[in-house]
Image: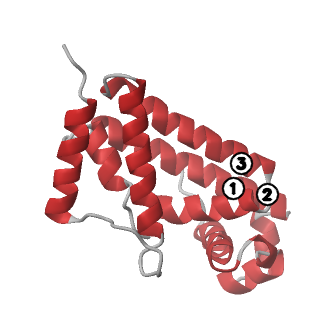
Amino acid sequence: MSRPPLAREKVLDAFEQILIDEGERAATMDATARTAGVSKGGLLYHFGTKDALESALLERLVGLVDEDIAAITNADEGPVAYFLRSSAMESSALDRTLIAVSRLAQSGNATAVGVLHDVRRRWSDTIRPHVADESAHDLVMLVSDGLYYNNALAGSAIAGPVPRGAAMNTLITLVEAAVKRRP
């Protein structure tokens, strides 16, 4: 598959950043063109409508999740450990796109809501074969959610703990012991 044109990616990056920083209402075509440093005609060449821009962002998320699931599946440390460790990601492409798509979902975009549900299901389905049962699966998913949530709130007055280094290794060891498949 060939790489998308640089200008197209620059426009999509600008749209994503506006969604993250200011929300869906601020993410107009004019604001996106201005932030991307392209003319309105340049933006329209790549994305004829705001719906096309939103669709491209959703496609970006699906592609990044495909890559993440491959990384989870092939992780040397094991799927559960990788999944938990990567739940505390900071400013990764996946994190930024996930936040931007969440902004679309929060504004009532039903397609974005559906894509986010599918992402969650895909991560869940990837982890399920590597744990003992549904309770173990729930534990991994809830710890992952907590890590992601607390990491997203880092620096705020309501942020919770996000273990790093040895503390993260200890947490992963505890979770893996609790969810391990029994022979």
Q: Which amino acid does the dot numbered 2 rest on?
A: Ala
Q: Could you give the CA–CA distance between mark 2 and mark 3, rounded to whole angstroms?
A: 16 Å
- Residue 56: give its label: 1
- Residue 52: give its label: 2
| Between 75 and 102, the one nearer to me in the picture | 102
Q: Say what secondary structure mark 2 lies in.
A: helix
Q: Could you give the CA–CA distance between mark 1 and mark 3, rounded to whole angstroms?
A: 15 Å
Rendered position, 180 above or below 9 = above
Q: Residue furthest left?
A: 166
- Residue 113: give its label: 3
Rendered position, 169 above or below 161 = above
Give the residue at x 44% y 70%: 91
Q: Disc 1, disc 3: CB below 8 Å? A: no
User: Is residue 136 among the parts visible in the rendering?
Assistant: yes
Give the residue at x 23% y 47%: 172
Numbered disc in front, either 2 or 3: 3
| Between 15 and 154, the one nearer to me in the picture | 154
